[in-house]
Amino acid sequence: MVKKIAEEHRVLEGLFANAIRHGESSNSEESVRESVLELREALEAHLLAEEHLYFPTIWALRPEFKSRLRAFIRAHHHFRGLIQEVTGLIESDEREEAMHILQGLTHEFKRHEASEEDCLRSLGDEILEKGAH
Ligand SMILES: [Fe+2]
Ligand SMILES: [Fe+2]
């Protein structure tokens, strides 16, 4: 599961980069809209999977991780708000403002991913250490 989460993060990074590439070029409104919607769908699916499947599965096995994982979930509400704002701005043809917010979201989300992966790696190490005894 740790590997799956990291793989989803890499896919999301590709979709963030793709949406920004479309938004910053002279691509048609339609292609920008599509790339942003594709990102939004994948991002929302990932956040939901962490909230309802991945993280609860992990904290059922390792309750000591629950508060850290719940803190990640609290940050998700902020990301949802931002991606909704980005798609709203694209729909109302305010591409420049949408891209500005999307740039900020990209950086913040990258930091979020890195913290999650650090946390999950420490979980992996602890499990590995226990397994070795
Ligand atoms: Fe997350
Ligand atoms: Fe994540």
Image (cartoon, rainbow, N blue to C red):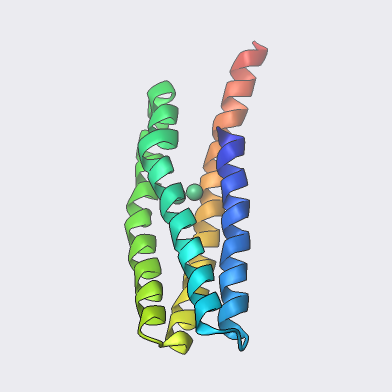
Measured as percent of width and height from the top left, residue 11 is found at 61, 53
Q: Is residue 110 left or right of residue 73?
A: right
Residue at 55% across, 81% down: 23
Q: From this viewpoint, is residue 59 visible?
A: yes
Measured as percent of width and height from the top left, residue 20 is found at 58, 75
Residue at 62% across, 45% down: 7
The furthest residue to the top: 133
Residue at 46% across, 66% down: 37
The N terminus, quarter of image = top right
Q: Nearer the viewer, residue 114 or 31?
A: 31
Measured as percent of width and height from the top left, residue 47 is found at 41, 49
From this view, report whether residue 62 is shown above or below residue 99: above
From this view, report whether residue 97 is shown above or below residue 84: below
Q: In which image quadrant can residue 117 be found?
A: top right
Q: Nearer the viewer, residue 84 or 64?
A: 84
Q: How many marks?
A: 0
The C terminus, quarter of image = top right
Q: From this viewpoint, is residue 121 visible?
A: no
The furthest residue to the right: 132
Measured as percent of width and height from the top left, residue 73 is found at 36, 48
Q: Nearer the viewer, residue 91 or 117?
A: 91
Q: Is residue 77 left or right of residue 25?
A: left
From this view, report whether residue 64 is shown above or below residue 110: above
Residue at 35% across, 42% down: 70
Q: In which image quadrant can residue 51 be found?
A: top left
